[in-house]
Amino acid sequence: MAYHPFGLIPRGELEPLNALQDQYRKDTNGHRIRLMAGVYKSELGEPFFLPAVKAARQRLFDDPNWNHEYPASHLGTKRFRSLCEALFFRKDCLLLQEGCIASMQCLGASGACHMGAVVLNLHYTPFRNGELGKLYIPEQTWGLGTELLPWYSSALASLDIDALIEAIECLPPRSVIVLQTAGNNPTGCDPSKSQWTAVAEVFARRDHLAFLDAAYPGFVTGDVELDCEPIRIFAEANVPIILAATFGKSFGLYGERVGILSFTLPSKGVASRVEDHMKLLARAETGAQPAFGAAIVEIILSDSELRRTWQDSVRQMAAELQKRRSLLKAELVTLQTPGRWDTITKQVGMFFFTGFTYDQVTRLREHHHVYLQDTGRMAISSVGYSTNSQLEQT
């Protein structure tokens, strides 16, 4: 073969979830069931198109002034960013009122996590001074290779809050710790409000930085603002925050990749300087941010009627997830299926952490064509009434 500069490139080792998705696509069995992706589906297994999103999209289509020009800012529109900050931190947040939050639009929460990590690497004082060089994240997570903290206890079949707090207490001061704010992926186990307060107190005492991931607001209680309470608990405890949030789930805008990255800062002047570096980073990595999905979010959050319609849809999705949990648990109990099924309804959000072993998950996949993640995570959001009977019998 003639020389080519990429001719000897090795095959890439796919992240486990991507490899499973590829295996599912190649499975020709007509009764295969995919319970891997954290995507909300209707009871018939179809995409759910939120009415508010549909109306906002039509409003854009009907606007003669809508165009595809570059946006005025590399950070997303000022209105979009302000609406996001008010949603996640609340309008009465002192940091928001004093201009101490810097934000930029990003490509979903994944893009926000990436951009936040780049800013940390370049500008976080303990990293720059060589005092620290690690980032900590709960053990049950997205398969990322980093320093792990205890979260889920198999013995308790729930969050081990005592182990988590002890671990955070023992970390070097000014450590960076990643936590999900609601609907924990993959465990479905969240701290209570009082437990979040206790965690935030340790952060404040140890001068830790909270890198908060808000991917599923609204999918726990049905109330987006209530599910964002942990963010405000950390802010009120004067813990420095990096917030990575997405509108993919709560708006059903998965493919539009609409996210936001926010930093809480000690003054308006520091916030302005951080914003300057955000602009430099955005210019280098993405240029202009995608406008369409962000415009839909902006329209909905700024229109009281559409906002109420959106909030109703979020409540509907959260209630439907809880209903599916209850139905699945009831049928498994009726069938006298061996196992501890009370965890189905004790856990919250899009996922059920089954506790299945790797061998059990493999058997489900190879013998019954039921696809879960190797960790045993099941996407309740993908369990529809059409799959329930087959799933339970399996």
Image: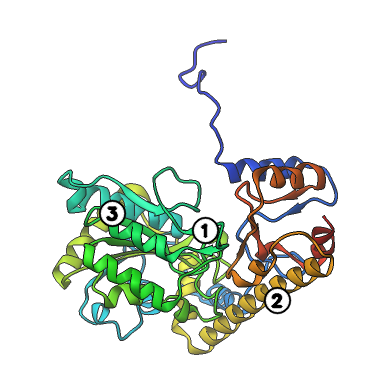
Q: Which residue is mark 2?
A: 323
- 186 sits to left or right of 165: right
Disc 3 from disc 1: Cα separation: 20 Å
Q: Residue furthest top?
A: 1
Asked whether disc 3 touches disc 1, contact meaning CB atoms under 8 Å apart, the reply is no
Q: Where is residue 1 shown, x and y percent of the image?
A: 57, 10
Q: Which residue is mark 3?
A: 171
Q: Which residue is mark 1?
A: 153
- 86 sits to left or right of 256: left
Disc 2 from disc 1: Cα separation: 25 Å
Mark 2 belongs to which amino acid? Lys
Above-or-below relation of 339 to 60: above
Q: Residues within 10 Å of mark 3 (few under 14, many from 20)?
A: some
Mark 3 belongs to which amino acid? Leu
**Which secondary structure, mark 2?**
helix
Q: Where is residue 118 shown, x and y percent of the image?
A: 30, 49
Q: Where is residue 98 shown, x and y percent of the image?
A: 20, 80
**Which secondary structure, mark 3?**
loop
